[in-house]
Amino acid sequence: MSADTETDVFEEHRPLLMGVAYRMLGRVADAEDVVQDTWLRWSRDDRAEVREPAAYLVRITTRLAIDRLRQVQARGEAYVGPWLPEPYVTESGATVPDAADRALLADSVSFAVLVVLESLSPLERAVFVLREAFGYPYAEIASLLDRGEAAVRQLAGRARRHVDERRPRYEVDPARRREVTERFLVAASDGDLDGLMSLLAPDVRLVGDSGGKAKAPARIVHTADKVGRFLAAVVPQAPAETSYRFVEANGGPAVLVLAGGEPDSLFQLEITDGRVTTVYIVRNPDKLRHLAAR
């Protein structure tokens, strides 16, 4: 295999590898590092015996991601305030035309699911991602992870039950989510408390992730009254140079807030039956840096 060919093969599979790594880690920078490490191994390994490059590359990526997750857990790092994944720009509209596939994409990279996945063990998370997000057969997952198929099935069942028990039900139709998000943005920007209250579910939550590096609630805010009053008081105070840009992140519409042209925050809504059930706000600058070129 020539150098050009080995590069072409890797680049063909890069989106798949990035998808696996991000779902495993919930961090864009870490996922990119894992994919780069996969490339380094791919470029120096003997590929003469590699019959299925995709399986070979996914195996390396998954194992590297498991190792990284174990390192993070071993360090026991404390995070300041609520934790959310780094926003991941998906842009599925042009590449995932089928509605069922879009729903699967939205479900597998949504903030709601990735937050739940943080509570799984690295192996459970790997099995869940490979099975639920990418549809790998149990036998192939067992081969990728050097585990018996029976053990993989047990891991998959345990992970599935854990996610199902904790994952909220939410609207995945992008047009509906976009419509509600636009109305929400207008009401919040105008400080229109009545407009916000008409959109918020009674038990709505606001989850703000700053990592202690920006202003955001230190705890999750509960109930429509508290969330509505917080947003109506804070959002209209944004500086005059603040602008808003719609992006597709984590499988659904989100709003990137720019201050002086630089990412300041990103928010996304969880919507059920036309009402906002969760407001996710990412303000940690470390998690927004990769959105600067958007």
Image (tube, rainbow, N blue to C red):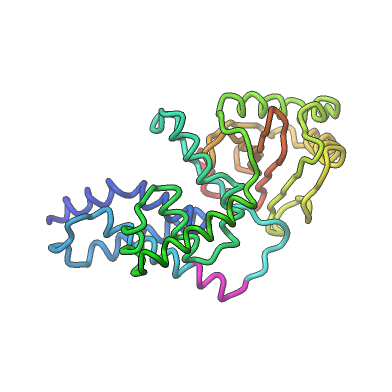
What is the residue that sits farthest to the front in this orientation?
150
Residue 70 belongs to the span the image colors magenta: yes
Tell me the chief SS of the magenta region: helix
User: Residue 96: x percent and y percent?
Assistant: 41, 32
Q: Is residue 272 above or below residue 6?
A: above
* Left-right relation of 68 to 161: left
User: Residue 121: x percent and y percent?
Assistant: 53, 66
User: Residue 153: x percent and y percent?
Assistant: 43, 61
- Residue 167 versus residue 226: which sits nearer the camera? 167
- Residue 181 versus residue 122: which sits nearer the camera? 122
* Left-right relation of 63 to 79: left
Magenta extent? 69-76
Q: Is residue 128 above or below residue 173?
A: below
How many labels sit on residues? 0
Q: Residue at (27%, 46%) from the top-left corner?
A: 12
Q: Residue at (46%, 35%) from the top-left corner?
A: 91
- Residue 133 versus residue 194: which sits nearer the camera? 133
Q: Residue at (65%, 44%) from the top-left corner?
A: 168
Q: Quadrant of the N terminus?
A: bottom left
Q: Quadrant of residue 65?
A: bottom left
* Left-right relation of 41 to 61: left
Q: Is residue 98 above or below residue 56?
A: above
User: Residue 233: x percent and y percent?
Assistant: 85, 37
What is the residue that sits farthest to the bottom in this orientation?
74
* Left-right relation of 143 to 182: left
Residue 290 belongs to the span the image colors magenta: no
